[in-house]
Image: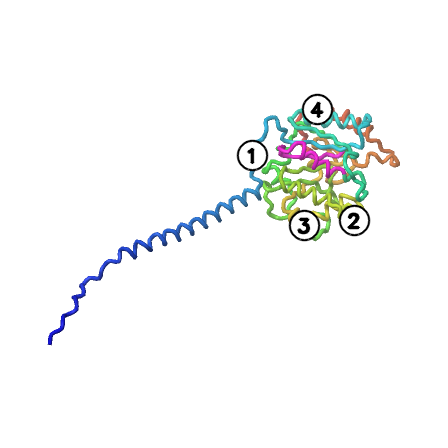
């Protein structure tokens, strides 16, 4: 009995073209998703780095915007002869460089809750300046008892230029000399510095300081003016509050540089490295309002300006730094 033979199986298996073509789009889709995820991660990282560095290349600065705003706080609108000397000094300096001069009063700000000394007014005054001049690059606070003695020196070149700042920053030094356990950073990059303060013999001074525009500067001022610090009754008010912030908050110290006092806050009656010398950028008459010690702000300012020449535009002497 014969049975029908099964059909012969081809020697070469069929090419499963349909199966292959169905897998190819899946592979491509997976690869595209993977590449898209990598691209998104790279873009996010670049945006983060741009934000951390305060990159403002895409920002449009309105024409006529002053690069620097010079801020000095007065006690009231009723200005005496000494106040006019200070105002003229600021306006002359600002006019030479195209800066703006801003003169608020301590009474412009609420310092009653909790009640604090009027010296705290410098902090909201700087925040006020940032609101009035939102596109300026730097905000330079100079106390009422400071005189600009070398008006040809600009903020950008004398202090904030990265090459200059690199040479004057105090690196790996006690924040509060001589023995603070917290030191300034060893390798801080000047391009990332957003605040510059001077260091005295035994403290951080705030009669003269500079802030760079940005979210960090606003955060710094808001933290410094926090009601917790104002209610703490520090012995040196905002001075001790500042030192606390710098020493115990790494986000502050990371973007802040300390420079020698003579760079922009030399004391006329000071001693040692912080004492004013002819050619220094700023002469501070710190303590000149202490009449019990026979001092007079107006007399000292007038004598200093007459001695050096208030219209002197020559370059700093060899003693200046």
Picture disc at residue 312:
4
Q: Residues within 10 Å of mark 2 (few under 14, many from 20)?
A: few
Picture quarter with the C terminus:
top right
Residues at marks 2 and 4 touching, judged by CB atoms closer than 8 Å: no
Q: Residue 307, position in %: x, y?
A: 77, 26
- Mark carried by residue 232: 2
State how far apart marks 2 and 1 are (Cα).
40 Å
Badge nearest the viewer, 3 or 2 = 2
Mark nearer the N terminus (3 vs 4): 3
Of circles 3 and 1, the one toward us is 1
Q: Residue furthest bottom?
A: 1
**Is residue 179 positioned above or below 194 on the image?**
below
Left or right: residue 28 compared with residue 17: right
Q: Position of residue 106 (x, y in %)?
A: 78, 35
Question: Residue 253, how many percent across, how many down?
Answer: 66, 47
Residue 290 lies in the magenta-colored region:
no
Q: Nearer the viewer, mark 2 or mark 1?
A: 1
- Disc 3 from disc 1: Cα separation: 30 Å
Picture coordinates of residue 27 (x, y %)? 36, 54
* Real-space CA distance between mark 3 and mark 4, rounded to the nearest whole angstrom: 42 Å
Q: Which residues are magenta?
A: 121-143
Residue at the spot 70% in from the left edge and 28% down from the top edge: 101
Relative vertical location of residue 226 with respect to residue 130 in this rendering, above or below: below
Cα distance between the residues tagged 2 and 4: 45 Å
Per the image, label 3 sits on a secondary structure element best described as loop
Q: Tell me, for residue 59, which label it has, or none.
A: 1
**Mark 1, mark 4: which one is toward the viewer?**
1
């Amino acid at each position: 009995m014969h049975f029908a033979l099964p059909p012969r199986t081809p020697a070469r298996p069929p090419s499963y073209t349909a199966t292959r073509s169905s897998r190819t789009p899946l592979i491509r889709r997976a690869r595209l998703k993977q590449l898209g995820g990598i691209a998104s991660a790279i873009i996010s990282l670049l945006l983060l780095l741009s934000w951390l560095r305060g990159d403002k290349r895409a920002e449009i600065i309105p024409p006529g915007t002053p690069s620097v705003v010079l801020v000095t706080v007065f006690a009231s609108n009723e200005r005496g002869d000494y106040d006019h000397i200070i105002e003229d000094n600021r306006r002359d300096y600002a006019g030479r460089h195209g800066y703006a001069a801003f003169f608020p009063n301590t009474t412009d700000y609420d310092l009653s809750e909790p009640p604090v000394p009027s010296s705290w007014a410098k902090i909201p005054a700087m925040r006020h300046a940032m609101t009035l001049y939102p596109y300026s690059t730097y905000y330079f606070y100079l106390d009422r008892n400071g005189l600009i003695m070398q008006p040809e020196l600009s903020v950008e070149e004398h202090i904030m230029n990265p090459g200059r700042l690199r040479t004057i920053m105090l690196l790996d030094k006690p924040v509060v000399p001589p023995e603070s356990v917290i030191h300034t950073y060893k390798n801080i990059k000047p391009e990332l510095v957003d605040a510059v303060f001077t260091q005295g013999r035994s403290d951080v001074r705030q009669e003269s300081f500079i802030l760079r525009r940005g979210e960090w500067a606003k955060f710094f001022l808001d933290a410094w003016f926090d009601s917790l610090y104002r209610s703490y009754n520090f012995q040196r008010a905002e001075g001790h509050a500042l030192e606390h912030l710098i020493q115990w908050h790494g986000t502050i110290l990371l973007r802040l540089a300390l420079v020698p006092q003579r760079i922009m806050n030399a004391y006329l009656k000071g001693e040692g490295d912080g004492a004013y010398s002819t050619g220094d950028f700023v002469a501070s008459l710190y303590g000149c309002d202490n009449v019990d010690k026979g001092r007079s702000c107006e007399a000292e300012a007038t004598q200093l300006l007459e001695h050096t020449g208030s219209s002197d535009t020559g370059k700093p002497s060899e003693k200046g730094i």
